[in-house]
Image: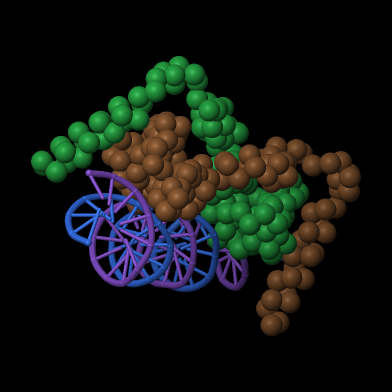
Chain colours: A green, B brown, C blue, D purple
Amino acid sequence: MQGLTIQEAAATTGWSARMLRYLERVGLLEANRSPGGYRVYGAAELQRLRTLRELLGQHELGLSDVAFAKRLRDTPELADAVAAWLDARPHRPQTVASPDWLRFEQDKCRRLLADAAAA
Amino acid sequence: MQGLTIQEAAATTGWSARMLRYLERVGLLEANRSPGGYRVYGAAELQRLRTLRELLGQHELGLSDVAFAKRLRDTPELADAVAAWLDARPHRPQTVASPDWLRFEQDKCRRLLADAAAA
DNA sequence: GAAACCTTGACACACCCGTGCTAAGGTTGC
DNA sequence: GCAACCTTAGCACGGGTGTGTCAAGGTTTC
């Protein structure tokens, strides 16, 4: 078994063994397995564990944040959709010119509220 | 007061008034205010509220995810740091050549565990 | 100036996240 | 072949998220 066991890896990286398993569960870092199923941590994994620790500490992040960043990276259409919303483009000049959007929205809203009251 | 009140905006966008305030609190969408302090929602805000709703629904996201994406966008050094970790570069070939990292790590770990036991 | 709406602040609650610990059983290494 | 370690699965629990509701007080509108 070439590499460190989970407990050894935990000791050298500052995580707990529990958290190492949890990191795997949320898809952030998975270790190789021995023939019998034991997790085996190599130099690359240790490095990654240490840098992850720094990353979280220095920027006040949670694991779910990093996991989401990974999801963004792995799912371009998700990244696009989110970026599109964040860009807050002043919205396409389409129906925009209509001056009575306000009345329209208010009418719609009044109808909705009336329906709600009737129910 | 040119625009919709919070309750009207809620009715037309499908959010609750409570959530509109919450969205503001987590920094995702803030409305203008009337002289007296009332929130005032214009066409742009309504559009944004509706698209946000779609975004969340279609991709199984939480508000905190979008908030984090915003933080990534607003803080380039954070984005860089996260990207660097995710890129999982095989790490710079520095001390790498040393063949006995394994023994080194295990020794270190053994020391740590011994210290822990002694305490 | 009164009715209807808004404001902030608080309590509440269900659910998820990060984390520890325990139990029952399989693997490794001497 | 046994001690020491690992595996998964589970209970527990404090803190954050998303949501409702209520209270006390200010604004808008007519």
Q: Residue at x 42, y 53 (%)?
A: B36
Locate the C terminus of chain A by quadrant.
top left
**Quick check: can you spot residue B49?**
no
Along the line of sight, the residue nearer the viewer: C22 or B12: B12
Tell me where residue B48 sits by quadrant.
top left
Up/down of B25 relative to A97, above or below: below
The answer to whether residue A102 is above or below residue A58 is above
Left or right: residue D3 versus residue B113 is left
Residue A44 vs residue B43: left or right? right
Q: Is residue C26 above or below residue A89?
A: below
Write the residue at 84% across / 41% down: B92
**Residue farthest to the left, as pictured:** A118
Residue plotted at (35% across, 45% down): B6
Any part of residue B68 in sight = yes
Percent of width and height locating residue D22: 23, 66
The picture places residue B8, in percent across and down from the top left corner, at: 30, 41
- Where residue C7 appears, as percent x and y from the top left, is 40, 57
Residue at 60% from the left image edge and 33% from the top image edge: A73
* A24 or A2, nearer to the observer: A24
